[in-house]
Structure formats: C-alpha cells, structure tokens
Image (cartoon, rainbow, N blue to C red):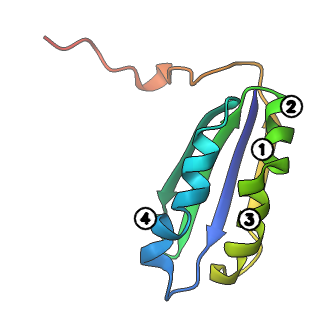
Amino acid sequence: MIFITAKFRILPEYADRWPEIAAEFTEATRAEPGCLWFDWSRSVADPGEYVLVEAFRDEEAGAAHVQSAHFKQAQQTLPPHLVETPRIINAMVPQDDWSLLGELAVPERG
C-alpha cells in the first residue's frame, strides 16, 4: 500500500474550521475505491497544525486519487487557508492494514 502522512499548518483564523473546510475533499477521497483510510488529527502541541494519515491500496489507486476532480478542486480551494505548503512523507509499505503494536499489548479484559 501507499502510506502517506502530511502535516498542514492552517492560518489561525481557519484552524478551528479546518475539518469543515476540508470536509468535501475528505468525504470524496474516502469514497474512492482504492482509499484504505484518510484520517485527520489535530496536533496537541500546535492547534494550528493538522496531521493527515492516509493510505491507498496501490500505486494505481494513488494515481487515481491525484487525478480525481476532487483532488484538482482541493488544489484550488485548500491552499488559501494554509500558512505554508504541507509537508509529507510518502512510502510504499508491504501490508494492507494496521499492525498491532505488540510492545504495548493490552491484555484481554473480562
């Protein structure tokens, strides 16, 4: 799978509304057949920063994402709300879902 993490620094006047501002893009991306997940989180250290964790089934799905109409629209509508160009890590990972973090295994309850 293609695993991507991106950091978005949002202008202060838009930071609280970022989930709403990015909602259409988020929903359309999550509906793509090759999207495994597309999840936003807000930084606890910097409330103006959002982290996007996303994954696509394979290179074909990643290419379909960046060629989609909603991606092209986001290229126009999202940057005016940003402090700077988002930073990204993009890697091919030989798995298709999250693995368990064994070092912090939770014992069965009950």
For mark 2, what is the residue? 59
Res. 46 visible in picture? no
How far apart are labels 2 and 4 at the CA level? 32 Å
Extreme front residue here? Answer: 69
Q: Indicate the position of residue 45 as horizontal and vertical percent values.
A: 47, 69
Q: Is residue 107 left or right of residue 79?
A: left
Closer to the camera in the image, 25 or 41: 25
Q: Between disc 2 and disc 4, whose residue precedes?
A: 4
The first of marks 2 and 3 along the sequence is 2
In the orientation shown, which residue stands out farthest toward the left? Answer: 110
Near mark 1 (Cα within 10 A), the count class, few <14, some 14-19 or many ≥20, is many
From the image, tell me which residue sits under label 1: 65
- Res. 44 mark: 4
Q: Is residue 3 above or below residue 81?
A: above
Q: Is residue 62 visible?
A: yes
The reply to whether callout 4 and callout 1 are in contact (CB within 8 Å) is no
Q: Amino acid at mark 1?
A: His
Examine the rendered structure and indicate whether residue 76 appears above or below residue 11.
above
Give left or right: position of 28 versus 93. left
Say which quarter of the image contains residue 57: top right
> In the rendering, at what x and y percent does residue 16 appear?
42, 76
Q: Nearer the viewer, residue 9 or 72?
A: 72
